[in-house]
Structures are given as C-alpha cells and as structure tokens.
Image (tube, rainbow, N blue to C red):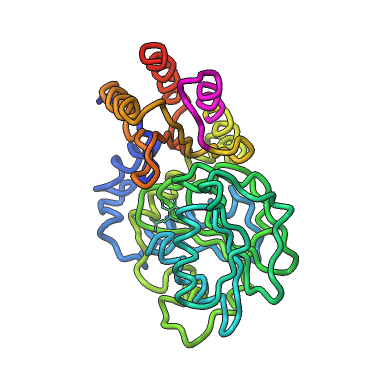
C-alpha cells in the first residue's frame, strides 16, 4: 500500500502502527473472539480500554489527582456551550480572549448563555498575533478566563500561559494537546476534540479540576452537567467506544515515542523545517507574527492565488494531501500533528523548495 502524506487539519494523520493495531484487533479483540464494537460498554473488555485511555492521559500529561479526566461526545464544540452552562453562573461575567475563528465560536456560544467580556480581540491584526501572556488580567469577579492555545485556522499559538490570580483558567487545546509539556496546575480546565493529536474523531477530552465541578448547577439536565460525567467516570451514558479505543492505542504509541517531551521535540523540529523554508525564500510568506507561530498548523502564502492552487494540486499529485488553507482565509496550510512523521515533512520541504525554484 502506498500511503498518502497527510497534512490535514483534522481529522488527520494517525501513525500507521496505530491503524494497523486497530485493524488487527477489530473483529477479534485481543483473541477474545469478539469485537469491541459489539460488546457492552459495561463489559470488562471495554472497561479496561476506557480506564487505560484515562490513565495514559493522566500519566503522559502529569495530571494531578484533584482533576477528573473525561472523554465525551459532542466534540470541542459542545464544550463551547457546556462550559458557560456549568461554570458561568447566574449574573456573572466570564473573560474570553478572541484570537481567531475558534475562540470566536466559543465566545458566540457563551454569549447565548451569559455575560462575556472580551479581554483581547485580534481583529486589527487580522488575528495574526496574540497578546503577551503576562499582560492578561481577569476582570473583577470574573467567573473564568477562557483562551484557545492554538488557532487551527489562523496558525497562531500561545507560547506562555496567562496567569490571572484566582480566576479559573479554561483553555481549548483541541489542536495542540499532547504536543508540549504543560503546567496542568495553572489550568482549571483543558478541553478539546481528540481528532488531531489523540486519535480518531468522535470524542472530546476534558481535564477538569474537581473544585470547578462544584459550580455545575443541579438545574442542568444530566448530560449537560459535567458533574454527572465526572461522578460516573465518563460512563454515565454509552461512550464513543471505538474512538476511545483509538485514543488508548494512540497514547500507547505516544508513550513508546518519548511521551510529551518526545512529541514536543518532534513538533519543534518539524515546524522549524517548514518555517526555515518560508523564511529562506521571498517566494513564500508567513502571515503570522513570528513570536506566536504554531508548531502544529503552519499557514503560508504564495505570490498569487493561482500559484497557491497550482502548489496544492502538484503536491497532491505527489501524494501530499490537504495543503489548502481553510476556505475562510485562503492560502496554504500544512498541519503537522503528532501523527505526521518527520519524513513527510522532509518530502514537503523538498517539494516546496523545488516549487519555488521552478515558479519563483
Ligand atoms: N477548537 C479548535 C481549536 C478546533 O480546531 C476545533 C476543530 N477544528 C474545535 C474547537 C471544534 O472541535 P470539534 O470539531 O471537535 O467540535
């Protein structure tokens, strides 16, 4: 089989070893004569997978004992609604950073639930930069402070963490979780979809400090209340079993490959290879502030839209898929999550250099 080189923004590249292990165990899970896709989620076979996925998250990210780890349906998007429903509180205001498309979606949903104060809006820079983390302050009596660690479409990433006193910090880490070491205790909650750095699509992860859960109002219906899920170890209802199995197998791969530190080293190395091409050449332009360049989603422009279309087409013909930028911003984007091997990035940078030589 000739595998494509997958630069998709998500769902995205999954290591071949992970896919193969899942395939080998799909119909006959570990020699038990039955598939995980056909046993009760209360069965020991699944229960072990569920708990192993949670304990690998805990171990790899060094999550302290006073946090709950959940995998739930609804993606990162349902969390945009559930977070204010659970933690905003009647008559209170929450602080949000508007760093781009994904932050804006979180803000728009929160505004439908309660009061939102936008502490920073990147509009004037076309969302190409971020504020200094040290300049961030929560407003008086703020319910929580929300930000997006990596803007998947804009290609910008926080490099330091905002510290806002006692105000709980909540972060959408959909597109850079597990790609760098984290001081978990600076956060009250970290969440995101699993389909970029953790496994196949179908679930979102939540890491929630337990004291925050005390805020979840009893008036919420069962599913919408994070406390329900935390009390039941994310087994209140049928979990997305296939996805969570995928997360477990993916995290075992992360562990074998140096854990979070290994992923961070790889992300730094791979992203530098591409940024060096962008910087070393007048042909390509990076539209983002160099201080906040994402190590996961690298956005770039070519001299014209025609050349961008040609670039994407020729790359695809050579097996490099999904290099087109998001339809809302245009240009090109290479997403190089944990599952993208360094060899794929070498192939891409060779192609980029060759393309600029021929067309520059
Ligand atoms: N936040 C960010 C930063 C994202 O990149 C995405 C998805 N691309 C989401 C939230 C939404 O996640 P989901 O599609 O799982 O709802």
On the rendered structure, is 315 left or right of 253? left
Write the residue at 45% across / 47% down.
Answer: 198
> Would residue 99 be counted in the magenta stretch?
no
- Residue 285 visible in the shown view: yes
Indicate the position of residue 194 as horizontal and vertical percent values. 43, 52
On the rendered structure, is 45 left or right of 253? left
Q: Nearer the viewer, residue 167 or 101?
A: 101
Indicate the position of residue 315 as horizontal and vertical percent values. 32, 24
Q: Quadrant of the C terminus?
A: top left
Query: Which region of the structure is painted magenta?
Result: 271-287
Q: Nearer the viewer, residue 51 or 254?
A: 254
Write the residue at 63% across / 62% down.
Answer: 119
Write the residue at 66% across / 67% down.
Answer: 168
Q: Eyeballing the image, is 160 above or below 190?
A: above
Residue 20 found in image quarter: top left
- Residue 3 visible in the shown view: no
Q: Quadrant of the N terminus?
A: top left
Indicate the position of residue 331 as horizontal and vertical percent values. 39, 35
Query: Which residue sits furthest front?
Result: 124
Q: Nearer the viewer, residue 107 or 321?
A: 107
């Amino acid at each position: 089989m000739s595998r494509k080189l997958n630069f998709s923004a998500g769902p995205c590249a999954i290591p071949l070893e992970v896919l193969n292990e899942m395939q080998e165990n799909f119909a006959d899970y570990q020699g038990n004569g039955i598939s995980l896709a056909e046993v009760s989620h209360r069965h020991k076979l699944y229960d072990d997978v569920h708990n192993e996925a949670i304990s690998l998250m805990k171990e790899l990210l060094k999550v302290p004992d006073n946090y709950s780890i959940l995998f739930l349906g609804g993606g990162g998007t349902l969390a945009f609604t559930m977070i204010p429903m659970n933690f905003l509180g009647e008559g209170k205001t929450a602080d949000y950073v508007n760093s781009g498309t994904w932050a804006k979606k979180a803000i728009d949903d929160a505004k439908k639930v309660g009061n939102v104060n936008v502490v920073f809006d990147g509009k004037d820079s076309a969302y190409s930069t971020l504020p200094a983390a040290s300049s961030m302050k929560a407003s008086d009596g703020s319910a929580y402070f929300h930000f997006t660690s990596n803007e998947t479409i804009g290609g910008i990433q926080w490099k330091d963490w905002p510290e806002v006193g006692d105000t709980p910090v909540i972060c959408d880490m959909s597109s850079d979780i597990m790609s760098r070491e984290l001081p978990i205790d600076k956060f009250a909650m970290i969440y995101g979809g699993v389909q970029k750095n953790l496994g196949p699509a179908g679930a979102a992860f939540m890491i929630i400090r337990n004291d925050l859960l005390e805020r979840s109002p009893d008036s919420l219906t069962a599913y919408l209340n994070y406390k329900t899920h935390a009390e039941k170890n994310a087994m209140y209802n049928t979990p997305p079993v296939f996805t969570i199995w995928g997360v477990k197998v993916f995290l075992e791969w992360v562990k074998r490959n140096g854990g979070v530190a290994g992923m961070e080293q790889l992300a730094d190395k791979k992203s530098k290879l591409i940024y060096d091409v962008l910087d070393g050449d007048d042909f390509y332009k990076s539209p983002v502030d160099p201080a906040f360049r994402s190590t996961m989603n690298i956005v770039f422009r070519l001299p014209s839209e025609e050349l961008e279309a040609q670039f994407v087409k020729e790359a695809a013909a050579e097996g490099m898929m999904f290099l087109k930028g998001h339809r809302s911003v245009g240009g090109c984007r290479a997403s190089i999550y944990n599952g993208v091997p360094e060899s794929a990035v070498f192939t891409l940078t060779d192609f980029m250099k060759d393309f600029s030589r021929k067309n520059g």
